[in-house]
Amino acid sequence: MRSIAFTNQKGGVGKTTSTINVGAGLCLQGKKVLLVDLDPQANLTYSLRMNSQRIEKTIYDVLKGTTPLEEALINHNGFDILPSSIDLSGAEMEFANEPARETLLKHSLSSLEEYDYVLIDCPPNLGLLTLNALTAVNEIFIVLQSEYLALHGLSKLMDVIKVVQQRLNSEIEISGIICTLFDGRKNLNNEVVGHIKDYFGPKVFDTIIRDNISLAEAPSHHKTIFEYAPESHGAKDYMSLAKEIKNGS
Ligand SMILES: Nc1ncnc2c1ncn2[C@@H]1O[C@H](COP(=O)(O)OP(=O)(O)OP(=O)(O)O)[C@@H](O)[C@H]1O
Ligand SMILES: [Mg+2]
C-alpha cells in the first residue's frame, strides 16, 4: 500500500484537484483507492459528493475515536472517500493537549490493508492536521503552481518535513513534485518549471498539469475530470500523471 500526502502550505495551488484526479486516474487503472479529506474546508468532499448523499460521519469523528473508519467512508464510482467537514476546524485546538496528537491519523488508518493507494489532501497550513498527514504516510507529493513565487516559503515546509522525519516518521520521503496550472503561452511559467526542476531534479514528474477550465468546472458538477470532460487536457494530463505515479512505485 502506498500512502501519499499532497501538501503545500500555500493555498489554491491545486492540491485538492490533484488528489481527486490522480486518485480517479489510478482507480481507472484498476487500483483500489482511498481519498482522505484532511482539510476543514472540505473542498475534496464537496467536489465529489452527490447532493443527495448526506454525510453522517466524517474524519473528525474518526480522529476523535468515536466512529470506526469504515463507518465514515463514502463511495464515489469505484473509489472511497473519507469525508471532512467544518467540524474539523476546531480539531487543532481540541486535540492540542492530547499526548498522541500527531499520530491520531496514523492510528486511524492503521487497520487499512485493502487499498493500493491512500491519498491525503492536506489543508493549506503547517498545523497539527498537516503534521498528522506527514506522520501517517510514507510518501509526500508537493504540489506547486507554475507561477512566480512557486518556491517561496518552501523552506518552511522542508523544515517541518525534516522535523517529522527525525521525531515522528523516519520513513517519509518527498517522492514527487507536481507542477500545476501551467500556461505554456507564458514564458514565466516555463521559467518557473525550469527553476522547480533545478531545485528538485528528477523528483519533478514529467507530466505538467496544464491550466484547463474543465478542471475548475468539474467540482461544481460533483465529478472527477474523467467523468466531467474525458477528452479535456485536464483528463489527459491527470491520466498521464497517474500512470507515471503507478509506474514509479
Ligand atoms: N490545472 C488547473 N486548471 C484550471 N483550474 C484549476 C487547475 N487546478 C486547480 N484549479 C482550480 O484552482 C482552484 C484551486 O485549486 P485547488 O482547490 O485544487 O487548490 P488547493 O491547493 O487544494 O487549495 P486550498 O489550499 O485552498 O485547499 C480551484 O478553483 C480549482 O478548481
Ligand atoms: Mg484544497
Image (spheres, rainbow, N blue to C red):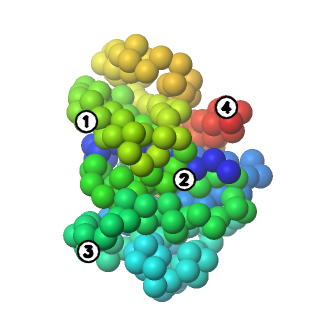
User: Which residue is pictured at 75% across the width and 47% down the height?
Assistant: 29
User: Which residue is pictured at 25% across the width and 36% down the height?
Assistant: 156
Residue 149 higher or lower than 12, as above or below? above
Amino acid identity at mark 2: Leu
Do the numbered discs 2 and 4 sit on residues whose CB atoms are within 8 Å? no
Give the numbered dot on residue 182: none
Q: Is residue 33 left or right of residue 181?
A: right
Residue underneath mark 3:
94
Circle nearer the viewer, 4 or 3: 3
Disc with the residue nearer the chain's start (4 vs 1): 1
- Image quadrant occupied by the C terminus: top right
Circle nearer the viewer, 4 or 1: 1
User: Which residue is pictured at 38% across the width and 45% down the height?
Assistant: 167
Disc 2 from disc 4: Cα separation:
15 Å
Q: Quadrant of residue 241?
A: top right
Give the numbered dot on residue 156: 1
Disc 4 from disc 1: Cα separation:
27 Å
Callout 1 secondary element: helix
Do the numbered discs 1 and 3 sit on residues whose CB atoms are within 8 Å? no
Residue underneath mark 4:
248
Residue underneath mark 2:
119
Q: Is residue 71 left or right of residue 150?
A: right
Disc 2 from disc 3: Cα separation:
25 Å
Amino acid identity at mark 3: Glu
Disc with the residue nearer the chain's start (4 vs 3): 3
Disc with the residue nearer the chain's start (1 vs 2): 2
Q: Nearer the viewer, residue 170 or 215?
A: 170
Disc 1 from disc 2: Cα separation:
22 Å
Q: Is residue 222 visible?
A: no
Disc 1 from disc 3: Cα separation:
25 Å
